[in-house]
Image (cartoon, grey):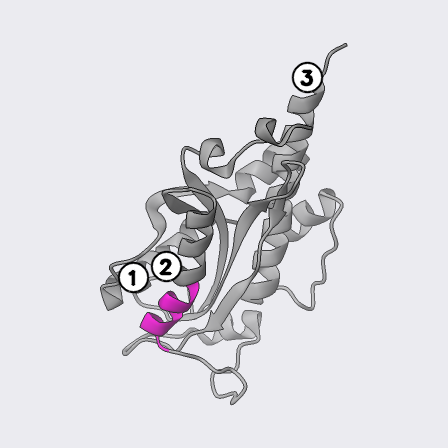
Amino acid sequence: MDSSSLPRMSDRFRGFLPVVVDVETGGFDCTRHALLEIAAVPIELDGDGFYVPGETVSTHVEPFAGAEIDPKSLEITGIRLDSPLRGAIDERAALDHIFAPVRAAAKRHGCQRAILVGHNAHFDLGFLNAAVARVAHKRNPFHPFSTFDTVTLAGMAYGQTVLSRAVLAAGLDWDGDQAHSAVYDTERTAQLFCAVLNRWRSFDLAATRPA
């Protein structure tokens, strides 16, 4: 295929770069509960115009001053706040760590900003926006309220809305022992998102192919 006819990311989503994000937290309320871990994966295009996950960036996060942490959330995620291996950094540094490569990816693809992709994306965006507000971050590359939600996309494409079931329905691997890690869930969500988009692209190519 002529490279000039391949889709460009800057043309595909109104100038937005899809970036998959997953957060692990100390509860469900983004204004009260701590952000504990965050990971992001920009979506790229390969040489044939199909969508592929980019490089993962992640960090553990120190709870903000006065944050609440529900022990039940820690049981689910397996996060040990006192572990010397966590290497957690404060929210401002964590956002800088995530935002810098996201801005670089958006610039590389000629996109004006990023749009968050998540499984139940409003949850991840809520915690992200709350952290941005707490530290008064001025260089947030993400759209403040628009998202792509793989719950909806997977429900449409595969009839499944639970992440593990949707990933398996897409023909991908799922390891329950690694679930509820921000990195693992982000990478699997990125693969799921790409699978749905590539399935649609294949339909488009088949529909436009000469008989």
Q: Which residue is mark 1?
A: 132
Element marked by disc 1: helix
Write the residue at 73% across / 12% down. Answer: 210
Q: Which residue is mark 2?
A: 128
Three-letter code, disc 1: Val
- The CA span between labels 1 and 2 is 6 Å
Write the residue at 71% across / 43% down. Answer: 170
Rendered view: 106 above or below 90: above
Judge whether residue 167 can be spotted in this image.
yes
Q: Quadrant of the N terminus?
A: top right
Q: Which residue is mark 3?
A: 207
The dominant secondary structure in magenta is helix
Among the two numbered marks 3 and 1 on one chain, the one whose residue lies closer to the N terminus: 1
- The CA span between labels 3 and 1 is 43 Å
Element marked by disc 2: helix
Frontmost of labels 3 and 1 is 3
Rendered view: 114 above or below 153: below
Three-letter code, disc 3: Ala
Three-letter code, disc 2: Leu
> Dot 3 surroundings within 10 Å: few (below 14), some, or many (20 or more)?
few
**Image x and y of residue 189, in percent:** 59, 51
